[in-house]
Amino acid sequence: MANKPNGLLTKNDLLEMEARIRKELQKKADKDDLKRFATKDDLNQLREELVVIKDEVVGELKAMREEFEVHAFSHSRLDDEIDDHEKRIKALETKITL
C-alpha cells in the first residue's frame, strides 16, 4: 500500500489488506501459543484452590456470626442487670422517701 496524497485507500489496497488478514486468521496455533492457554489440570487446580478459599471464608463468617451472637447475648444480659438495678434503686428511693 503506497501512501496516497489524499490519504484514501484504493480497492486494490483494501483487497490486499483483506488477503493479509485472511492469511493471519488461517494460521494454526503452535506449541508456544498453546502454552499461554490454561489446561484442564490448571483449571482443576484453580477449582480446588477456590474451594479451599471458599471454605476458609465460610468458616470465618461462621466464627464471626457466633461471636456476634455471644456479644448480643452479653448485651442482653447487661440490659437485664441494668433494669434490675433500676427497679431496686427505685424501691430503695421509695422506702427512703416514706
Image (spheres, rainbow, N blue to C red):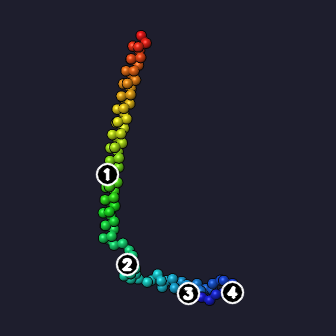
For marks 1 and 4, give the CA distance. Answer: 70 Å
The disc labelled 1 sits on which kind of residue?
A: Gly
Contact? badges 3 and 2 (CB < 8 Å): no
Disc 1, SS = helix
The residue labelled by disc 2 is 34
Residue at position x 66%, y 83% from top? Answer: 7
Crowdedness of circle 4 by 10 Å Cα count: few (<14), some, many (20+)? few
Q: For the residue carrying disc 2, how many other residues have a C-alpha within 10 Å: few (<14), some (14-19), or many (20+)?
A: few
The residue depicted at 63 percent of the width and 86 percent of the height is 10
Q: Position of residue 1 (x, y in %)?
A: 60, 88
Label of residue 43 in the image: none
Q: Secondary structure at mark 2?
A: helix
Q: Tell me if label 1 and label 2 are in contact, CB under 8 Å.
A: no
Q: Are marks 3 and 1 in contact (CB under 8 Å)?
A: no
The answer to whether residue 3 is left or right of residue 62 is: right
**In this picture, is 3 found above or below 86?**
below
The answer for how far apart the CA atoms under marks 4 and 2 are is 43 Å
Secondary-structure class at tag 3: helix
Q: Is residue 92 above or below residue 83?
A: above
- What amino acid type should be assigned to the residue bearing mark 3? Glu
Badge nearest the viewer, 3 or 2: 2
Report the disc number at residue 16.
3
Question: What mark, if any, has residue 5 been given in the picture?
Answer: 4
Position in image of residue 58 (x %, y %): 33, 52
Mark 4 or 2 closer to N-term?
Answer: 4
Left or right of residue 51, residue 2 in this image: right
Whole-number angstrom distance, CA of label 3 to CA of label 4: 19 Å
Where is 48 relative to 12, above or below?
above
Outermost residue on the right side: it is: 6
